[in-house]
Image (cartoon, rainbow, N blue to C red):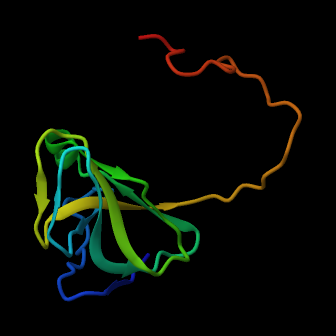
Amino acid sequence: MKLPIKKLTPTATIPTGFAHEGDAGIDLFAAEAITIKPMERVQVSTGIALAIPLGYVGLIWDKSGLSHKSGLKVMGGVIDAGYRGEIKVGIVNLGTEIHTFAVGDKVTQLLIQKIEQPEIIEVQELEDTERGEDGFGSTGV
């Protein structure tokens, strides 16, 4: 599979692939300098657009180090195959310190995954399972 990527701004960094063999995510980079205060939400420009093939989706996920060390959390993050606009990343700073991205800093990672589009059918009852309707905390500690 090929993933066509278009550079939209001179400050954009085109992802070059995967950092290590077997990695799932492609790093995405900030195309602008931006500061995020604690509990603030921002939209970070990547300066790129993608052509994800039909039958696939792009999923934007946290960078583990930024998430664990700085408290940065990606918000949303589904890129449909038909979308051709700029990839912008919603991030919230759940940490206690101000975080600044410089142009070219890694912001997040993108996973490309195959999707299924099931036929939606309305039913009166669902098949019973061992878990049933038990929700949060139902499997114990």
Q: Position of residue 62 (x, y in %)?
A: 29, 51
Which residue is found at the position 45% from the left and 80% from the top?
51
Quarter of the image with the N terminus is bottom left
Q: Is residue 34 left or right of residue 108?
A: left
Q: Nearer the viewer, residue 14 or 42?
A: 42
| Residue 19 shown left or right of residue 112 in the figure | left
**The C terminus - image quarter:** top left
The residue at 32%/80% (across/down) is 48
**Image coords of residue 3 (percent x, y):** 39, 78
The quadrant holding residue 15 is bottom left
**Which residue ends up furthest to the right in the rendered image?**
124
Compared with 45, 139 (above or below) is above
- Residue at the location (72% across, 55% down)? 118
Q: How many marks?
A: 0
Q: Residue at x 10, y 68 (%)?
A: 102
Residue 81 in sight here: yes
Q: Position of residue 93 (x, y in %)?
A: 23, 47
Q: Examine the rendered structure and indicate whether residue 65 appears above or below residue 115.
A: above
Give x and y (percent) for residue 117: 68, 59
100 relative to 128 in the view: left or right: left
- Whether 3 is drawn above or below 38: the answer is below
User: Is residue 2 at least partly visible in the picture?
Assistant: no
